[in-house]
Image: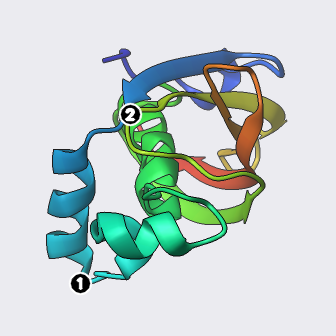
Amino acid sequence: MSEPRPIDGYRVGDRATARRRFTDEDVRRFAELSGDFNELHVDDQAAARSRFGRRLVHGMLTASLFTRLIGMELPGRGAIYMSQSLRFTAPVFIGDEVEAVVEVTAVDLARRRLTLSTTCRNADGHQVVEGQALVMVDL
């Protein structure tokens, strides 16, 4: 976990990363929590008949890596997540490892806000999620 810093302590290009390999248990727990039991996520046989050929990790579960980074790393404690845009560009399958990156693209000193690019890539380097977040630095 990063230590809080004042808004003028952030620079364009600052970044944080996190990696996670998504498991069957992760997907089932997220389905329980979210109520999203779409068979593409939880039913091996139905997913095998789909265009993907196997089960998918929920897109929002993949994107949840961003809240981990924003709340714990960049900016970390005291961050107020104001908005997030997301575009899911490729599937994530159970067993895939994903790397999430948040990077400062703008600093608004007067309003104490950071604009962050948010991306996830799979182990092959293919982008699977892209977006942008707006975060207020409160501490």
Earlier sequence position, callout 2 versus callout 1: 1
**Distance of mark 2 from mark 1, alpha carbons?**
21 Å
Task: Left or right? Give the position of 81 relative to 25.
Answer: right
Residue at screen point 32% across, 63% down: 44
Q: Nearer the viewer, residue 124 or 85?
A: 124
Residue at screen point 28% across, 68% down: 42
User: Looking at the rendering, which quadrant does residue 95 occupy?
Assistant: top left
User: How many callouts does the rendering have?
Assistant: 2
Query: Pointer 1: residues within 10 angstroms few (<14), some, or many (20+)?
Result: few
Tell me where residue 137 appears, x and y as whole percent: 53, 42
User: What amino acid does circle 2 point to?
Assistant: Gly
Note whether 21 is above or below 35 in the view shown.
above
Q: What element does badge 1 sit on?
A: loop
Residue at screen point 77% across, 31% down: 126
Q: Nearer the viewer, residue 17 or 7?
A: 17
User: Looking at the rendering, which quadrant does residue 78 occupy?
Assistant: top left
Task: Left or right? Give the position of 5 relative to 3.
Answer: right
Q: Nearer the viewer, residue 137 or 126?
A: 126
Tell me if residue 57 can be seen: yes
Residue 95 image label? 2
Query: Pointer 2: residues within 10 angstroms few (<14), some, or many (20+)?
Result: some
The residue under label 1 is 35
Tell me where residue 70 appears, x and y as whole percent: 48, 38
Tell me where residue 85 appears, x and y as whole percent: 71, 65
Question: Which quadrant is home to the N terminus?
Answer: top left
Q: Are marks 2 and 1 in contact (CB under 8 Å)?
A: no
User: What amino acid does circle 1 point to?
Assistant: Gly
